Image (cartoon, grey):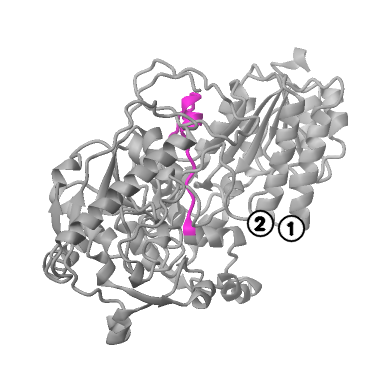
Amino acid sequence: MAADEGPEPAPPARTQTAEIVPLRLPPVADEPAPEPLPDPRTGDVDEWGRSERVRSFVRQAYDPMYRRWFRAEWEGLDKIPTEGGALLVANHAGAIPSDAPTIMHGVEVELDRPVYGLADHFFKSMPVLGTLWSRTGGVVAHPDNAYRLLREQQQLVLVFPEGSKGPGKTYNERYRLRRFGRGGFVEIAMRAGVPIIPIAVVGAEESMPILFKVPSIAKALGAPYFPVTANMALGPVGAFVHFPAKFKLRVLDPVTFDDVEPDQPRYSRSRIMDESEAIRQQIQEALFDMLRQRRSVWFG
Amino acid sequence: MPKRVLITGLSTYWGGRVAQALEADPDVEVIIGLDTREPKVKLERTEYVRSDENYSILSRIVRATGVDTIAHTFLVVDSTQMSSRAMHEINVIGTMNLFAAASAAGSTVRKVVVKSAALVYGSSPKDPYWFRETDRRVAPVRTKVERSLLEVESYVRDFARDNPHVCLSLLRFSNVIGPDISTPLMNALQLPLVPKVAGFDPRFQLVHEDDVVAALLFALAHEVPGIYNVAGDGMLPWSEIMAIAGKRGIPMPPFGIGMATDPLRRLGLVNLAPELIDLLRYGRGIDNRAFKQAGFEYQYTTAGAVEAWVQSQRLAKTVGTKAFDYRYEEDVEKFFRHSPAVIREHSDQA
């Protein structure tokens, strides 16, 4: 679409094009890059709201949780690239999902590179928690945000395609994956030209099992769901403490889309749905396999 | 560079700055400035025409002067300045009349530059972190200033569609900061305790006033049809902007801010624009790369603009604010422009 061939990839064309937006930009002048402007920053919050200072503090605070409480154990961690963009895709569970911090912490500690976690905009609308979420690497799940992170900044991005339907399922449906949205994550990976790395997580389901849900409260709060969890039996503080279920994380083989061009405005819907379903199947089978080998919920 | 320019909103900060800059260019033959109030800055050769707020005399001016370029800088983007009815007259009806005049049969207008605002994107938790020019707003329209700007843009779009021979640039500016201008955001930063929303620390993107003027002049001087975002590089959390300004914040309740600040507003203590309240919760980022790609170069990043403003505040604290000692006197201005006694370099073009 855009006729430039600069090092920076052209943004993807949009379906909604306002009529007076120029479709071809004037050629970039062949001048040396201008000197960077003075930028007197005092903080280290990046354009996504992530702060490495806050993040490293949270890493320190969370490490005992990760090592002692959940005793997280990885398998195939070397399949996550140490450089370049990649989309991490995992199953999602637990009333207050414990898998997102575990995956983000694990990858950051083991691979020493930041992970941005895509999540529902509901987080951003919450006071205090929303700010903390943003400072620790949370980003609102929006295709433009994901594209920018993956394609232009070559970052690691974590997404749970089940969305809130994953953690919002009751205990008797544990480890049965929900629909993977509309396959948007596949389209983003194709457009950004990055691999998808599926991760199967065992343990999150038992860390905060949902007994039943109260839709009326959820509606009043504007939340995706309002759970009544087994943890609530431990009192008001206990309601926010996860059970020490043993965490096992298996990184599956990366899925690449070398045969499709990045930066296309649209991709074949049937191809997207097929790939999405294949990845879902892959994670589901890995989960069943891991559950077959699991002797104890608490000791693995 | 344009030859014959009509500037709307000559007495606004932007109209005055653009007129001053155009006067310095000998290629610009005629500069006509329209406004309801008299100009606030000293101008050498700009012709000031008083009009009513919705420009009913505009088509006559365009016909009589044969202007080729219109710089539409009159749009109100600060709802604390005036009543919503006055704002509607200026923004919507004024723009409607402007485009009616510019698209009349035999119109000589070939270029229009409109100064709009990033307000049209709104601010909500569902937004992309960087709005592109092609993106539609996500949040429903709630404030009057946003609604009027969206109506203005729909007129702009219609005009561009009907008049493909006119080069139309629509510039959407993010929140402006700078030594000489006053905006709701800067007013908030000047309070002894800066309002913030408890539990929120949104990302802000600002643009320096000099970059705004430079962007308008760039669009006037170059062929850059289309919509462009104009904003400094980088995004700062509100807390960091306060830190650069050396200010402490006062938390407001995260919900029902309108209700909480309404009594203060009635007492005239705090005039927090409603369009600022969502911004203080969720922030807004706009993608400025298209305008850069078109060749525009910024002088300030977001942090640089804040720092420049803070320095000007420090200076003002010591030597006092620079008072405008200029007052428009019609007879004096008429004398300098039209009296045969005055020796003029451009007299042959008059």
Q: Residues within 10 Å of mark 1 (few under 14, many from 20)?
A: some
- The x, y position of residue A293, in whole percent, is 14, 60
The disc numbered 2 marks a residue on which chain?
B
Mark 1 vs 2: CB contact within 8 A = yes
Residue marked by disc 1: B84
Towards the viewer: B61 or A24: A24
Residue range (magenta): B282-299
Magenta stretch contains residue B157 = no
In the figure, B170 relative to A138: above or below?
Answer: above
Secondary structure category for the residue under label 2: loop
- The x, y position of residue A274, in whole percent, is 40, 39
Label whose residue precedes the other's in the sequence (1 or 2): 2
Secondary structure category for the residue under label 1: helix
For the C terminus of chain A, give its image quadrant: bottom left
Q: Residue at x 27, y 61 (%)?
A: A99
What type is the residue that disc 2 sits on?
A: Ser
Q: Residue at x 66, y 73 (%)?
A: B266
Query: In this rendering, does residue B36 appear at all?
Result: no
Task: Tell me if A283 is positioned left or right of A10 in this view.
Answer: left
Q: Residues within 10 Å of mark 2 (few under 14, many from 20)?
A: many
- The x, y position of residue A259, in whole percent, is 35, 25
Residue marked by disc 2: B79
Give a yes or no on whether discs 1 and 2 share a subunit: yes
State whether the magenta stretch is mostly helix, strand or loop.
Answer: loop
Towards the viewer: B196 or B37: B196
Question: Real-space Cα distance between discs 1 and 2?
Answer: 7 Å
What type is the residue that disc 1 sits on?
A: Ser
Q: Residue at x 62, y 25 (%)?
A: B225
- The x, y position of residue B350, in whole percent, is 78, 18
